[in-house]
Image (cartoon, grey):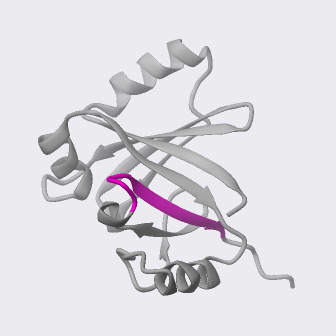
Amino acid sequence: MKNVEHIGIAVRDLEAAEKLFGTLFNTQPYKREAVASEFVETSFFQINQTKIELLEATNSDSAIAKFIEKKGEGFHHIAFEVEDILSEMERLKSEGFILLNDKPKKGADNKLVCFLHPKGTNGMLIELCQEIKKPHL
């Protein structure tokens, strides 16, 4: 793992959260993006090397909606950047970690992602992410 890529925060109202965190960080989000496969709308802030991802559910059956219903708004996950997501998934699986998806999925902010089950990570949802590289022409 290379470094912390971002910290995910589940919110009920993305617009209100953008205002709150915009004031807190004294900056505006650099990107807003829907991730249809996960039923979320995301908003990203960057403070120096640190990224914060705000996540709002777009469907009451989404993982974020269920998370907020059960635990309320707040810290949702920590994401780590990896060089090769497939080999990292294989390594972690061989070490006994439970992967929530068998193959990387397209996530927000031009990333391939995979999540580790919180049962094997002291209750924390861990995301692996690798930047999607554009092929050379």
Q: Could you tell me residue 60's position as x and y percent? A: 13, 52
Camera-side residue of 17 and 33: 17
Residue 88 visible in rendering: yes
116 relative to 2 in the view: left or right = left
Decide if residue 109 is in sight here.
no
The foreground one among 22 and 70 is: 70
Q: Is residue 123 magenta?
A: yes
The residue at 54%/65% (across/down) is: 128
Q: From the image, which quarter does the N terminus lie in? A: bottom right
| Quadrant hosting residue 8 | top left
* Quadrant of image for the C terminus: bottom right
Q: Please give left or right for residue 121 compared with residue 51 in the image.
A: left
Residue at image coords 35%, 74%: 100
Magenta stretch? 121-131
Residue 59: where, in percent of width, then height? 18, 54
| Residue farthest along the right direction in this orientation | 137
The mark total stands at: 0
Q: Quadrant of residue 86?
A: bottom right
Q: Position of residue 124 (x, y in %)?
A: 37, 52
Classify 30 as above or below 34. Answer: above
Q: State the image coordinates of residue 89 (x, y, percent, origin top left).
A: 54, 80
Q: Which residue is pictured at 41% across the width and 85% down the height?
A: 102
> Which of 96/18 is in front?
96
User: What is the quadrant of residue 62 in the picture?
Assistant: bottom left
Majority secondary structure of magenta residues:
strand
Examine the rendered structure and indicate whether residue 27 appears above or below residue 91: above
